[in-house]
């Protein structure tokens, strides 16, 4: 009788009960930037680490936990150099930072808790290439976690510690040098008129920066799209339809891996997929100067290319840019009927627009979704849509009880804020004075600083910009005051009352008046089998963020304080509509 496969909960229970406390984990990491380095391949590390553990009689933990390890072996494909720069400090003196490698983090937690005796790496740079992770490893080692390296031995002495520090320094230095070389190469190639990225649709990518040939299939279609739009009689939607009719697709690309695929033991190579051309992608194509035979230089200026030929002449491109600044209405329909909500509602899955049509006197909206779209519902009546929107408007309102609870909590938090305010203002004033003095010194001594060689002209400009940015940040922090919070809360209450009033107006409004209300409140509307999804206009964002409002009102107000002007414009728009 075969044993049943253990669940993750059962495996974790065994780990916590100490079943593997005398066993070791084997960790192998492959960097994404070392695809051609066989020396550090997962297979090579597995072989050398296995030989080392057998020689040293280190028992490997016979444990398999999905997303972490298989038979005690951890395979991770992630950079060991990148690290999150954010840190936080607790009141009891603890410093926290984010470890960017999920499997390494899990291993460190298990080892710190004593669930495993130790862990084996090939060498130091397979374990870490940044200061933060170095610190974690050294703390684990000091806490008697047996950390071994197949290709290195560190004595438990000052000499061993020095050896470890040197290896860590070289590992970090290697990554920095590699990063520098890549940046220098990119800068040099851009300066020489080469394209350092994938070429856009219409060109081929043979694997070299020196040559980006025109795609014989897609290139002529791209050229035709520019020429058609330059006539001024085709809209972006027309061009998207024409492109799809001609079979134009985005070149095959691999879809991003899911979290589960990234954590898999074996490397998963996803197949490349093509996508149809959509309206927003057509706009992106028409705005791209690459098609005129230009590339970006290191200063982000478009210069003539030395790696590809133009598909579009400068005159046509300039005409297209001029027309893109205007709203082009298609003349390729016999009659464009002015239905409410035309072009306002899209499919949640494929982003296609729901187009209005009339059947038996009833207005419906239909989406001709892309092949493979997962949204099964292609048609909605206008009544269904407007009823769904009414529910969403009601859902944005705060009840009287909610507003009272928020105001009470904010009152308490503002009282605490006022106690800290005096000290903060003195601190702000002192820092502002210091920054003003530094800026004044820099502005009045530019010439002497450049002549003395202390700064170059470019460094002077950068230093001035940095000081000005810090000064602006301080001014912005000062605006988040107790008075601003109270005024913001008044605006929230006013707009909530207006939303209650507008629902009654909405019930009796004709479809075109309903559309006016919808445009004031919502920026995007999407339909699926689950109903209506939406994004609100800037002034209504605090109302869409209800969970944060009820959980931490002060943080919620602070986050949305920058949108007060849009909120007041929304208040004026709704008042004007209701009064009219």
Image (cartoon, rainbow, N blue to C red):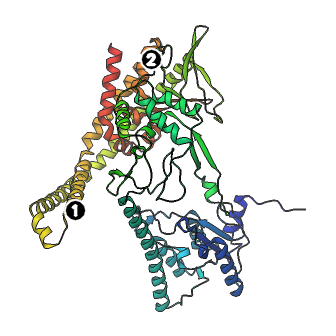
Can you identify the residue that label 2 sits on? 514
Residue found at the far right of this picture: 1
From the top left corner, tell me how far across and down residue 269 is, in percent. 65, 57
Q: Nearer the viewer, residue 473 or 18?
A: 473
Q: In this view, does 433 lie above or below 36?
A: above
Q: In this rendering, is residue 160 above or below 348?
A: below
Classify 10 Å Cα crowding around label 1: few (below 14), some (14-19), many (20 and above).
few
Question: Picture quarter containing residue 24?
Answer: bottom right
Specify the quadrant that holds the C terminus: top left
Circle 2 crowding by C-alpha within 10 Å: few under 14, some 14–19, many from 20: many
Q: Residue 458 carries which label?
A: 1
Q: Is residue 417 positioned above or below 46 on the image?
A: above
Marks 2/1: CA–CA distance: 55 Å
- Rendered position, 4 above or below 49: above
| Viewer-proximal residue among 460 and 511 | 460
Q: Quadrant of the N terminus?
A: bottom right
Judge by depth and name the residue closer to the eye, 360 or 456.
456
| Front in this rendered view, residue 265 or 508 | 265
2 or 1: mark nearer the eye:
1
Mark 2: which secondary structure? Answer: helix
Point 18% across, 63% down: residue: 457
Quadrant of the rendered image containing residue 377: top right
**Whether residue 505 is visible:** no
Which residue is painted at 45% across and 83% down in the image?
Answer: 165
Residue at (49%, 91%) from the top-left corner?
A: 157
Task: Work out which residue is located at the far top of the displayed protein and give it.
Answer: 361
Q: Position of residue 439 (x, y in %)?
A: 15, 59
């Amino acid at each position: 009788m075969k044993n049943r496969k253990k669940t993750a909960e059962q495996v974790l229970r065994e780990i916590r009960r100490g079943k593997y406390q005398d066993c070791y984990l084997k960790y192998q990491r492959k960097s994404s930037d070392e695809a051609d380095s066989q020396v550090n391949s997962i297979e090579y590390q597995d072989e050398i680490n296995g030989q080392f553990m057998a020689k040293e009689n280190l028992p490997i933990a016979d444990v398999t936990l999905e997303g972490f390890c298989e038979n005690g072996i951890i395979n991770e494909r992630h950079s060991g150099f990148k690290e999150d720069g954010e840190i936080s400090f607790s009141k009891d003196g603890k410093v926290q930072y984010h470890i960017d490698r999920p499997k390494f983090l899990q291993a460190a937690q298990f080892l710190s808790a004593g669930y495993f005796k130790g862990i084996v790496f090939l060498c130091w740079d397979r374990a870490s290439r940044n200061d933060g992770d170095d610190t974690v490893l050294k703390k684990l080692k000091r806490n008697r976690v047996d950390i071994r390296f197949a290709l290195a031995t560190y004595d438990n002495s000052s000499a061993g510690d020095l050896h470890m520090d040197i290896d860590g320094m070289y590992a970090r230095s290697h990554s920095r040098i590699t990063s520098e070389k890549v940046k220098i190469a990119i800068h040099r190639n851009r300066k020489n008129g080469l394209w350092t990225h994938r070429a856009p649709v219409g060109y081929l990518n043979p694997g070299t920066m020196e040559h980006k040939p025109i795609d014989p299939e897609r290139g002529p279609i791209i050229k035709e799209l520019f020429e058609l739009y330059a006539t001024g009689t085709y809209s972006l939607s027309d061009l998207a339809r024409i492109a799809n009719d001609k079979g134009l697709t985005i070149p095959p690309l691999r879809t991003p891996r899911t979290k589960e695929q990234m954590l898999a033991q074996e490397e998963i190579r996803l197949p490349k997929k093509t996508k149809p051309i959509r309206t927003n992608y057509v706009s992106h194509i028409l705005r791209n100067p690459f098609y005129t035979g230009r590339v970006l230089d290191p200063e982000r200026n478009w210069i003539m290319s030395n790696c590809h030929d133009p598909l579009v002449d400068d005159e046509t491109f300039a005409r297209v840019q001029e027309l893109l600044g205007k709203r082009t209405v298609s003349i390729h329909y016999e009659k464009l009927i002015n239905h409410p909500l035309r072009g306002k509602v899209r499919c949640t899955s494929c982003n296609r627009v729901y187009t209005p049509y009339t059947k038996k006197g009833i207005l419906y909206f239909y989406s001709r979704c892309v092949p493979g779209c997962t949204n099964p519902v292609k048609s909605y009546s206008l009544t269904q849509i407007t009823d769904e929107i009414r529910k969403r408007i009601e859902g944005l309102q705060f009840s009287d009880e909610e507003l009272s609870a928020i105001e009470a909590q904010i009152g308490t938090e503002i009282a605490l804020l006022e106690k800290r305010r005096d000290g903060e203002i003195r601190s702000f004033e002192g820092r502002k004075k210091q920054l003003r003095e530094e800026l004044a010194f820099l502005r009045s001594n530019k010439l002497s600083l450049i002549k003395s060689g202390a700064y170059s002209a470019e460094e002077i400009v950068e230093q001035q910009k940095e000081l000005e940015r810090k000064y602006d940040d301080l001014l912005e922090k000062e605006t988040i005051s107790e008075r601003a919070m109270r005024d913001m809360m008044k605006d929230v209450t006013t707009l909530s009352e207006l939303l209650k009033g507008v629902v009654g107006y909405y019930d009796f409004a004709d479809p075109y008046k309903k559309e006016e209300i919808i445009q004031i409140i919502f920026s995007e509307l999407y339909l699926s089998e689950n109903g209506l999804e939406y994004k609100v206009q800037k002034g209504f964002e605090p109302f869409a963020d209800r969970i944060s409002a009820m959980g931490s009102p002060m943080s919620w107000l602070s986050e949305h304080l920058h949108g007060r002007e849009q909120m007041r414009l929304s208040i004026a728009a709704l008042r004007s509509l209701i009064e009219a």
